[in-house]
């Protein structure tokens, strides 16, 4: 359920209209790295997390909802930057000089240029945000990454926050408006905060590398191929220990010869690691069983319900009954940990209600 509060999360202001910057700012409204992308990506990812990993669901939905709040701030800022365009356009009968509509100081030629480079504002929306990027490309769900595996999704989100952050950084020099700069700095900083939240959440899942369940083939996990001529650059990406698996990088200086020598890798052995095909297989099987039993223990296959019966909107405190969802709610309350706890036995009684509070009030702005 969504509940709308009319005030913005951050009091967005502008000093004066600036349709040029409004166009650029569309990048964060309907662009590939914008707020709608972030909001919808985390919202979509949250469905798979809801029952098996309720604490990650909480994180994803809190940040998704904040991203919708950012989308609202960006849209409001675009609207204010467009000033009175819509009002001027409505005055068609008056044949008014629409080219002078904004500050009155813009030259006619400049305004013609504006109309040519932002036709959507002048000819389509009449002065309001649209779900396009700054070039007019329509928003697409192809921007969204959701793979129903938290070790993958959280990494996608860390990347998404990085890109959202840098776009704000790139946008900032294109406005002189101190109010707009203040808003952009707020929005940029929140992406820095989100980056760290997703990183911390990923760290609670152990092991989380490689992403997913299946371990890599130890013959190929630490080989670096020098695939170009000229100078051979060495660094921690191809010498010493690999950062995640701690294997020793094997540097192949002459890949063409190496492919010949190994019959196109068919005879390549395992080097630089203690891992064997057997140990890798055992690791994959154990992790697969652990993750599978965790999810199976928390997601009912028969009767099910999304709401927690002990939640704040339950019609009465005594409404709990012996349903799958009721058991689920108790499990969630008794175990706030992440994936790492695996198939921890659930011993809490059905009557126990450690109600999660503190995060569900409508908020002070509603008073
Ligand atoms: Mn954001
Ligand atoms: Mn963010």
Image (cartoon, rainbow, N blue to C red):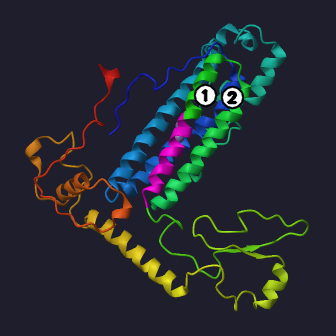
Residue 192 lies in the magenta stretch: yes
Q: Is residue 89 above or below residue 69?
A: above
Residue 312 visible, this orientation = yes
- The x, y position of residue 278, in whole percent, is 50, 87
Circle 2/circle 1 CB separation < 8 Å? yes
Q: Is residue 199 above or below residue 124?
A: below
Identify residue for label 1: 184
Please give the name of the residue rendered at 43% of the width and 38% of the height, measured from the top-left corner: 65
* Residue 224 or residue 143, whichever sits in front: 224
In which image quadrant can residue 295 be found?
A: bottom left
Residue 89 lies in the magenta stretch: no
- The x, y position of residue 186, in whole percent, is 56, 28
- The x, y position of residue 71, in whole percent, is 52, 33
Residue 131 visible, this orientation = no
Q: Decide if residue 320 is on the left or right side of residue 262.
A: left
How many neighbours does mark 1 have within 10 angstroms: few (below 14), some (14-19), or many (20 or more)?
Answer: many
* Residue 274 or residue 300, whichever sits in front: 274
What is the C-alpha distance between the residues marked 2 and 1?
7 Å
Identify residue for label 2: 172
Q: Decide if residue 4 is on the left or right side of residue 367.
A: right
**Range of residues picked out in magenta:** 190-205
Q: Earlier in the sequence, mark 2 or mark 1?
A: 2
Please give the name of the residue rendered at 15% of the width and 48% of the height, measured from the top-left corner: 353
Is the CB–ligand 1 distance for label 1 below 8 Å?
no
* Residue 160 or residue 352, whichever sits in front: 352
Location of the C terminus (image quadrant): top left
**Most distant residue in the left direction:** 318
* Residue 149 or residue 314, whichever sits in front: 149
């Amino acid at each position: 359920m969504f509940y709308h509060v009319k005030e913005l999360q951050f009091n967005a202001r502008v000093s004066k209209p600036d349709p040029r910057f409004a166009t650029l700012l569309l990048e964060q409204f309907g662009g590939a790295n914008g707020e709608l992308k972030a909001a919808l990506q985390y919202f979509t990812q949250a469905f798979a997390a809801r029952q098996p990993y309720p604490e990650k669901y909480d994180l994803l939905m809190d940040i998704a909802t904040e991203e919708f709040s950012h989308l609202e701030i960006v849209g409001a800022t675009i609207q204010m930057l467009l000033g009175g365009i819509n009002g001027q356009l409505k005055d068609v009968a008056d044949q008014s000089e629409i080219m002078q509509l904004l500050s009155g100081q813009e030259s006619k030629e400049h305004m013609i240029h504006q109309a040519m480079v932002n036709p959507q504002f002048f000819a389509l929306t009449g002065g309001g945000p649209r779900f396009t990027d700054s070039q007019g490309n329509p928003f697409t769900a192809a921007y969204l990454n959701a793979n129903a595996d938290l070790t993958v999704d959280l990494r996608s989100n860390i990347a998404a926050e990085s890109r959202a952050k840098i776009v704000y950084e790139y946008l900032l020099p294109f406005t002189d408006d101190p109010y707009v700069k203040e808003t952009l700095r707020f929005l940029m900083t929140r992406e820095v905060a989100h980056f760290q939240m997703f990183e911390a959440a990923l760290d609670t899942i152990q092991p989380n590398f490689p992403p997913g369940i299946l371990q890599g083939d130890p013959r190929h996990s630490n080989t670096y191929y020098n695939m170009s001529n000229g100078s051979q650059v060495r660094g921690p990406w191809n010498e010493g220990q690999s950062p995640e698996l701690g294997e020793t990088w094997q540097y192949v200086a002459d890949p063409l010869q190496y492919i010949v020598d190994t019959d196109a890798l068919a005879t390549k052995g395992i080097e630089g690691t203690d891992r064997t095909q057997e140990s890798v297989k055992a690791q994959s099987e154990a992790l697969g069983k652990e993750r599978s039993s965790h999810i199976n223990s928390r997601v009912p296959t028969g009767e099910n319900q999304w709401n927690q019966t002990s939640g704040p909107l339950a019609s009465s405190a005594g409404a709990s009954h012996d349903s799958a969802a009721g058991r689920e709610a108790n499990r969630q309350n008794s175990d706030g940990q992440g994936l790492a706890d695996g198939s921890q036995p659930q011993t809490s009684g059905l009557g126990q209600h450690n109600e999660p509070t503190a995060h569900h009030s409508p908020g002070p702005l509603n008073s």
